[in-house]
Amino acid sequence: MGQLFFEPTLKKAIQSLCAENHPSEGIVIRGKEADMKDLSCLTLGDKVTPSFTWSDVETRLTELLSQWKNEKYVRDRALEFPTWQEQMDMQYWDQVNGTNTWKDAIAKVKADHPKP
């Protein structure tokens, strides 16, 4: 879930394309993000040439950023939901007392952070 909370980067876009196009190759991404302007920052396996272009990296980054922005409600909900231990306790006591504490708590978080 860590990936969900952090804005995608060029490195994440390159890793995504490598996983998709070269799943069995080890990858090394060198340099600082600000210095990345082409695929010279990338080493793939043993003399393997990437099957994607820098334009593909930029396109993937745009896609990842769009997905990340569209899933803001997921990040917001994750910060608001009670811990799983608290939820289990709510469910136990709801069963014992015939209440709806857990359902109400979850419904409130979902109402406060609706899907777009």
Image (spheres, rainbow, N blue to C red):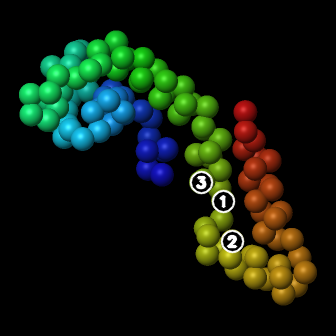
Residue of label 3:
79
- Dot 1 or dot 2: first in sequence order is 1
Asked where in the image residue 50 lies, by quadrant, the reply is top left
Question: Spatial distance from mark 1 to mark 2, Cα to Cα?
Answer: 9 Å
Image position of 65 with respect to 83: above or below: above
Give the amino acid at mark 1: Phe
The percent position of residue 45, horizontal first and vertical second, equals: 14, 35
Classify mark 1: helix, strand or loop. loop
Res. 13 image quadrant: top left
Viewer-closest of 77 and 48: 48
Name the residue located 49 percent from the left edge and 24 percent from the top edge. 63
Which residue shows up at 90% across the image and 81% down it? 98
- Regarding residue 99, the answer to whether it shows in the image is yes
Q: Which residue is mark 1?
A: 81
Residue 30 in sight in this render: no
SS class of the residue under badge 2?
Answer: helix
Circle 3 sits in a helix, a strand or a loop, which is it?
Answer: helix
Q: Residue 30 at what x, y percent from top left?
A: 15, 31
First in sequence: mark 2 vs mark 3: 3
Q: Do labels 3 and 1 touch, CB within 8 Å?
A: yes
Which quadrant of the structure image shows residue 70? top right
Residue 5 left/right relative to 25? right
Q: Label 3 sits on what residue type?
A: Leu
> Disc 3 to disc 1, how far (Cα)?
6 Å
**Residue tagged 2:** 87
In this rendering, the label closer to the viewer, 2 or 3: 2
- The residue shown at (60%, 38%) is 72
Evaluate if marks 1 and 2 touch, with contact meaning CB atoms under 8 Å apart. yes
Relative placement, left or right, of 2 versus 70 is left
Image quadrant holding the C terminus, namely top right
In the displayed structure image, the side of residue 88 where residue 100 appears, left or right: right
Q: Estimate the spatial distance between the alpha carbons at disc 2 and disc 3, rounded to whole Å.
A: 14 Å
